[in-house]
Image: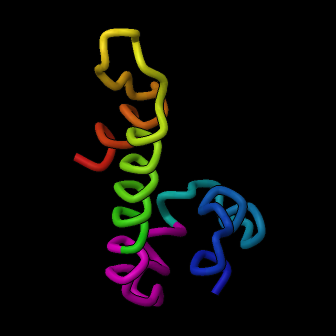
Amino acid sequence: MLLDAGESIKALSEYLGHSDPGFTLRTYTHLLPSSEIRTRKAIDDAFTEANAEDRGSASDGGGTSVPTPQATCQRALAA
């Protein structure tokens, strides 16, 4: 439940007294609910945000849009 709520695997490992977060993840990963919906939403949100930033980004004076570094980073991570 803590992982699904966003707690880090490292913190959970410490709470449980495990010396290795990898052990905690391997032991309890089967209890995590499917993350497919969260994954799709995160990618959709990243593209929606990147597209909005592209439309509102600064112009270089020549009429071309200059995407912000954050938008470029998000697209690279999503790819």
Q: Residue at x 48, y 24 (%)?
A: 58
Residue 34 painted magenta: yes
Whether 52 is drawn above or below 6: the answer is above
Q: Residue at x 46, y 90 (%)?
A: 31
Whether 12 is drawn above or below 62: the answer is below
Closest to the observer, 59 or 6: 59
Residue 56: give x, y in percent of width and height.
48, 39
Whether 62 is drawn above or below 58: the answer is above
Residue 39: give x, y in percent of width and height.
36, 71
The N terminus - image quarter:
bottom right
- Residue placed farthest to the left in the image? 79
Q: Quadrant of residue 72?
A: top left
Q: Residue at x 65, y 79 (%)?
A: 5
* 17 with respect to 33 (left or right): right
* 34 with respect to 57 (left or right): left
Closest to the observer, 20 or 40: 40
Residue 13: give x, y in percent of width and height.
66, 64
Q: Residue at x 57, y 80 (%)?
A: 4
Q: How is the image coloured?
A: rainbow
- Residue placed farthest to the top in the image? 61
Magenta part of the chain: 24-40
Q: Quadrant of residue 15?
A: bottom right
Closest to the observer, 51 or 78: 51
Residue 61 painted magenta: no
- Residue placed farthest to the right in the image? 15
User: Exactly how many numbered labels are in the figure?
Assistant: 0
* 64 with respect to 59 (left or right): left
Q: Main secondary structure of the magenta part?
A: helix
Residue 70: give x, y in percent of width and height.
48, 33
